[in-house]
Image: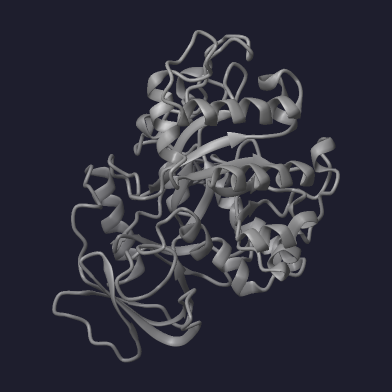
Amino acid sequence: MSFTQITRLAAACALAGCAFAASAADLLIRNAEVHTVSSAGKLAKADVLVRDGKIAAVGTALQAPSGATIVEANGKPLTPGLFAGLTAIGIEEVSGEASTVDEYLKLNAPAYAMQWRPEFDVTLAYNPRSVLVPLAQTEGLTWTVIEPGSGEGGSLIAGQGAAITLDGRFDAVLEGSRSMFVAIGNDSLALAGSSRAGQYMLLDQAVREARSTAPLGDRSLLLPTGREVLARYLKGGRFVFDVDRAADIRQVLAFSRRYGIKPVIASGTEAWVVADELARADVPVLIDPLANLPGSFDTIGARLDNAALLARAGVRVGFTQLLSDKSHNARKIRQVAGSAVAHGLPWDAALAGLTSVPAEIFGVAGSRGHIAVGQVADLVLWTGDPLEVTTLAQQVWIGGNAISMRSRQTELRDRYLEKLNRGAAR
């Protein structure tokens, strides 16, 4: 079956409202440059066999089962599906239209008088029919982590998010990936009496309340459900700290040691300053290497080789974006990784930062992030180097199903190109 036939079939199924996650046909991708992102490394002229939505074999001269779809890769790169970063895909449609934005919990109360709501879970608002989902799919992005925001009227503990498969299903949360999100630093000072010291004071109070069995008073930060949820995360759950300044990252590490929690650093513009401490604590970092200029006093130490310096120290580095439109332009995450390579990060480490590293961070490495037997068949065949901005995703499979390589953007492009061509022909 040709790529044109695959694309037409996938597009027809999408238009008919088919559920791609329901079943997957057997698939053999032949003669690809397979980037396994595992100890097997890069395999030239290799085959990947997919059965029942999972990778059944990786090797050479593999035989296709009867009725399987055969795709000739002609030596082009094949990678695992890419991580889109921390986004609001599916929980934000148009950022300027409040009725379509679900990642913020705005309680409209003074920070010192309000109660925190760690029980807030943005995955409940996830919409797989968002127009941002096919846009991400066509760019080779097969999963993301949706995160709550700490906006005005919120709290330092923003709430819960999780990894989401972008295959179009409603029950899209990936098991074991739920995380608690916490904002530290300049952007959330107003939520803690305008002092970083106030941030750590309030976090300490919230932890003490969660671990206590005493009745909650009128001035408690937590409600009973919030106490229950936070207490559960304090027993080995994952905390993602949005933090930039090196001094604040050190305080987060100390806070995490004090309470025995498992931290992840997100943003981490000055993480390179404390790279050795992060490595010793085995704390991973999700960064945007394009954050190379100070945007506040928290990011004075911004530099383009942040990722390279962290990796050299032994820190696990994954990628996310800090742009305000990161959900609508999630595809730019490949440019982010490519920039890290241009400034010293090894190419293989950059691809891992888009695949295996975030899968490990969010507890889904058993099913995603590699091309290996038993993994879910989230795969992307590229026209060239996937970290080059001129490269395109030629075909994407999620769970072994060929994804329609059409989106709202491609439809608009074709509509107006057709009008333009008609006008030029007159």
Q: Quadrant of residue 45?
A: bottom left
Q: Is residue 272 left or right of residue 48?
A: right
* Residue 307: image location, x then y, percent: 71, 61
Q: Is residue 322 left or right of residue 330?
A: right
Question: Which coloring applies here?
Answer: one colour
Please give the name of the residue rendered at 35% of the width and 39% of the height, measured from the top-left corner.
128
Up/down of 120 relative to 354, above or below: above
* Residue 196: image location, x then y, percent: 75, 29
Quarter placement of the C terminus: top right
Q: Nearer the viewer, residue 416 or 27?
A: 27
Residue 156 visible in the displayed image: no
Q: Quadrant of residue 70?
A: bottom left
Q: Quadrant of residue 156?
A: top right
Q: Nearer the viewer, residue 410 or 423?
A: 410
Up/down of 84 relative to 103, above or below: below
Residue 38 visible in the displayed image: yes
Q: Residue furthest bottom?
A: 61
* Residue 105: image location, x then y, percent: 50, 21
Q: Residue furthest left?
A: 66
Q: Nearer the viewer, residue 53 or 232?
A: 232
How many numbered circles are shown? Answer: 0
Please give the name of the residue rendered at 63% of the width and 66% of the height, measured from the top-left corner.
388
Q: Nearer the viewer, residue 186 or 6?
A: 186
Quarter placement of the N terminus: bottom left
* Residue 26: image location, x then y, percent: 21, 71
